[in-house]
Amino acid sequence: RGRVGAGAIAIERLTFAYQPGRPVLHDITLELPAGSFHGIVGHTGSGKSTLLSLLLRFYAAPAGSVRIDGVPLEGIPEESFRASVGLVPQEPFLLAATARENIAVGRPLSDAQVEAAARAAHADGFIRALAQGYDTFLGEGGARLSTGQKQLLAIARALAGEPRILLLDEATAHVDSETEQVVQRALAALRGRVTVVAIAHRLSTVRDADRIVVLNHGRIAELGTHAQL
Ligand code: ATP
Ligand code: MG
């Protein structure tokens, strides 16, 4: 399967506007080494999701560049891009299907691959504790999952594709501290294997990140570890 390399991201002088003359990202330059864990925080409307959208090629930036392992985003073939970049969206969807099917989502994965992804996402524990484990029916008419469990399931789903890069847009500012901790631990455990970029509403959610990027009105206001900020 075609892939990018190790998953290093280089963002250089990236500027973006949805409407001409009203930029929402200004001159963003950021190096994200392969296997690093970066958190992105900033108040609502500061441009966090827009930055993620650009990394996902949802939009093309008029100025600046994003390169993955040295290759400009626009030069990466679609199949290779999709195999290499995993997304945990702001509102993960649940299929009316089993936990296993919710991780595989149509891909021809073995039980071992599904369960390995769940373990990497720290989702294995709660799934095994469900009435029928991986065969428990979820979604409409099925077992109810907490917000944190849904997030871990969505991380498992993304990891099952063995991405080099994992992008997360945290669903809500109102996650409980238990959820925050499980997701935090799951992400930190991926360090060295997957390049993680996680949008968080609170600094504490990305406490373990190698670096935290603070966006303010589309600009990098601060950059450092949790201890430094
Ligand atoms: P939040 O914390 O609320 O998720 P955010 O930091 O993710 O906010 P963005 O969604 O990136 O912020 O929005 C940045 C700016 O771009 C905001 O002013 C927003 O109104 C604007 N914006 C976002 N999406 C669009 C769009 N599709 N069309 C036009 N403007 C948009
Ligand atoms: Mg957002």
Image: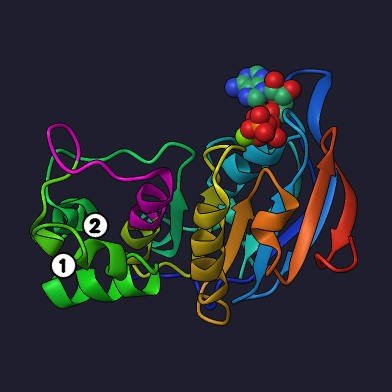
Position of residue 210 measured from the top left corner of the image (x, y, whole percent) = 73, 72
| Relative to 193, residue 167 above or below | above
Which residue is the site of mark 2? 103
Q: Which of these two is toward me, 31 or 177?
A: 177
Position of residue 163 measured from the top left corner of the image (x, y, whole percent) = 42, 67
Judging from the image, what secondary structure is the residue with disc 2 in? Answer: helix
Q: Is residue 109 visible?
A: yes
Instruction: Determine whether the beta carbon of the residue marked 1 sits less than 8 angstroms from the nearest atom of ligand 2.
Output: no
If the image is split into quadrants, where does the C terminus sit?
bottom right
Count every numbered label the image shows and give the total.
Answer: 2
Q: Residues within 10 Å of mark 1 (few under 14, many from 20)?
A: some
Which colour style is shown? rainbow
Q: Residue 124 is drawn in which quadrant?
A: bottom left
Quarter of image, ligand 1? top right
Q: Is residue 146 magenta?
A: yes
Q: Amino acid at mark 2?
A: Ile
Q: Earlier in the sequence, mark 1 or mark 2?
A: 2
Which of pointers 1 and 2 indicates the residue nearer the eye? 2
Residue range corresponding to the magenta coloring? 139-154
State the residue lying farthest toward the bottom: 192
Position of residue 88 measured from the top left corner of the image (x, y, whole percent) = 45, 50
| Disc number placed over residue 109 in the picture, else none | 1
In-image side of 183 versus 141 (left or right): right
Q: Residue at x 40, y 58 (%)?
A: 155
Instruction: Determine whether the beta carbon of the residue marked 2 sits less than 8 angstroms from the nearest atom of ligand 2.
Output: no
Q: Residue at x 21, y 64 (%)?
A: 129
What is the CA distance from the residue labelled 1 to the residue labelled 2?
9 Å
Q: Is residue 60 visible?
A: no
Q: Which of these two is toward me, 169 or 109?
A: 169
Q: Residues within 10 Å of mark 2 (few under 14, many from 20)?
A: many
Q: Amino acid at mark 1?
A: Leu
